[in-house]
Amino acid sequence: MWVQVDGQMRHPVLNLSEGGLFLLTDQPLAVGRELRLELPLADRMIRVAGKVVHATATEEWAGNGIQLTSLATSDSSALHDFLVAAVTA
């Protein structure tokens, strides 16, 4: 899955849960930075707010732990359903 960050950049997601995600970038993001994310689910796009809570880097990549901080109830339900379907598939 690829996520759009702040309406501009697209980055791959390695791990996704109802509480957050692990995002790969070229450079680590600043811890504490707030982000606007667009997540493409199977049948819809959801928009969420997130906050960088962890960042690490190697010579090849940077990984960023993003905590989801704001999610509409309908989007939360859609994300839950998406994750359940992925686990049971």
Image: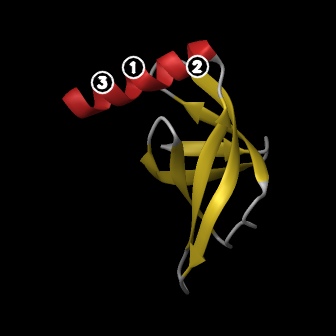
Residue 19 position (above or below residue 71): below
* Towards the viewer: 18 or 36: 18
Displayed quadrant of residue 47: top right
Query: Label 3 is placed on what type of residue?
Result: Ala
Q: Callout 1 environment at 10 Å: few (<14), some (14 to 19), or many (20+)?
A: few
Contact flag, marks 1 and 3 (Cβ < 8 Å):
yes
Q: Mark 2 or mark 1, which has the lower sequence index? A: 2
Circle 3 SS class = helix
Instruction: Count all numbered tags in the image, as a single digit.
Output: 3
Kindly report the distance in space between the C-alpha atoms of the residues bearing marks 1 and 3: 6 Å
Circle 2 SS class = helix
Q: Outermost residue toward the top?
A: 74
Which of the labelled discs sits on residue 75, or is there none? Answer: 2
Q: Mark 3 or mark 2, which has the lower sequence index? A: 2
Picture residue at 60% right of the left edge, 47% below the top: 67
Question: Residue beneath label 1, please?
Answer: 81
Contact flag, marks 3 and 2 (Cβ < 8 Å):
no
